[in-house]
Amino acid sequence: MEITFLGGAREVGKSALLVKGEKSKIVLDYGAHTGREPAFPMHVKPREIDSVLLTHAHLDHSGGVPLFYLGKGLELVTTGVTLEMSVILLEDFIKLSGFYLPFEYEDLLTMTRKTRRISLNETLEINGEFKARFQNSGHIPGGGTIIVENDGKRVLYTGDINLRDSQLLSGAELNFGDLDAVITESTYSQTEHEPRAKIEDDFVSFANEVVERGGILLVPAFSVGRAQEIACLLRTRNFTHPVAMDGMALKINDVLFRYQESLRDPVLFRKTLENVDIVSGWSHRKELIKTPGVIISPAGMLAGGASVFYNQQLAREERNGISIVAFQVPGSPGRTLLDRGLTVINGKTVKVKAEIRRFDFSGHAGRSELFELFEHVGGNPAVFAVHGDGDSCEIFAREIHERYGFTCSAPMNGDSIVV
């Protein structure tokens, strides 16, 4: 196998790999940078590709996939829940950035028609040459790591991976067997996460504190996974105050109801949503900001969606709170709020009086978990560290070599390796 790094090397965003066999070519993920003017991985000719395999729905992995469907399209392989959530996120991507995008809604429809829905732990064949197997990644519902086999060689692509259980998901499946190569994310390779239980305790304590002093707690949260996890957490901790959910998270809820097998505890999920106030429109939103409680709403970085309205309404009151539970990209409104305590209201930058707290509900493995992953790797694989900011990929590659003796490197976009 020859593997070319099309995107996501020494960067976070636009993840993509091209894998060549003797007679076939497949692409693993094809994401996007989702700034004002989106950016995509290195170009590959769709007519030369046999299949695209998609690990999960987040746009930094899925955002460029419709580019393969500007014509007749080819086969997309992913889980059903990943497909449906990807469509929701891509529709929103087109709505917000359509002027800059080289694809349209009809290309998204073609993508959907061309998709081969598979289950986790199902082994599939591609063009009689490749075998591929998706295993639970623990990152978001339906997300998978991928093991690709060709001519006796086995390669693991982690995509985004999380080894620890959360309220919503079970941690990643780690039955990898012997491998010839590992392509691993490095996002938090230089950062240790706090124990999940402590993060959850601190969050619930803050939620109670805000509501019991007569305030409203806004939780800007990613619509895919994080919003549902926060709601489930509040239920498991017997939070007795009102909880409302708004925005695109409601569409994701509908998808997850149809794919409850992707969740760690489907009963908890159902009971949680039975007791959540589902926001129905603007009059409902205006009523919510009058009553102490918790409001969970995308967008997680306060860059759009209903969370912008809630933030503007709640930011000026000291009794209110804002819980940052998602990663904040530098330059995003959420990052400005977190770092400087500032937000924009009616076109003016103002100092936020509401109490701001950050809680590290990451869906990625931290430093210890990324090393732990390699305790489950058999053989003597070559390791390639990708999906990390700054020097983290290089440092992590060096550390893996020092700890396990594997040959390791941090490739650049455009680099190719042979397994």
Image: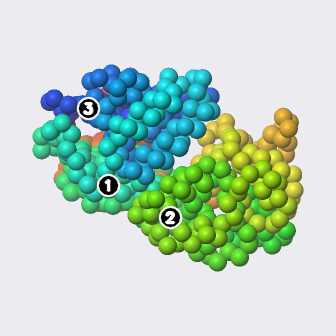
Residue 234 in picture, x, y percent from top left: 63, 70
- The residue indicated by pointer 1 is 119
Residue 400 in picture, x, y percent from top left: 33, 49
Graded by Cα atoms within 10 Å as few (under 14), some (14 to 19) or many (20 or more), the crowding at tag 1 reads: some
What's the residue type where badge 2 is placed?
A: Leu
Residue 266 in picture, x, y percent from top left: 47, 69
The disc, 2 or 3, on the residue closer to the chain's N-terminal end is: 3
Query: Which residue occupies 81% across, 47% down?
Result: 312
- Quadrant assignment, res 304: top right
334 on left or right of 176? right
Quarter in which the C terminus is drawn? top left
171 or 228, which is in the foreground?
228
- The residue indicated by pointer 3 is 50
Mark 3 lies on a secondary structure that is loop
Query: Which residue occupies 85% across, 61% down?
Result: 290
350 on left or right of 180? right
Quarter in which the N terminus is drawn? top left
- Distance of mark 2 from mark 3, alpha carbons? 34 Å
The disc, 2 or 1, on the residue closer to the chain's N-terminal end is: 1
- Distance of mark 2 from mark 1, alpha carbons? 19 Å
Residue 377 in picture, x, y percent from top left: 26, 56
Graded by Cα atoms within 10 Å as few (under 14), some (14 to 19) or many (20 or more), the crowding at tag 2 reads: many
Mark 2 lies on a secondary structure that is loop
Examine the rendering and report whether any part of residue 411 can be seen: no
Q: Is residue 75 above or below residue 338?
A: above
The disc, 3 or 1, on the residue closer to the chain's N-terminal end is: 3
What's the residue type where badge 3 is placed?
A: Asp
- The residue indicated by pointer 2 is 168
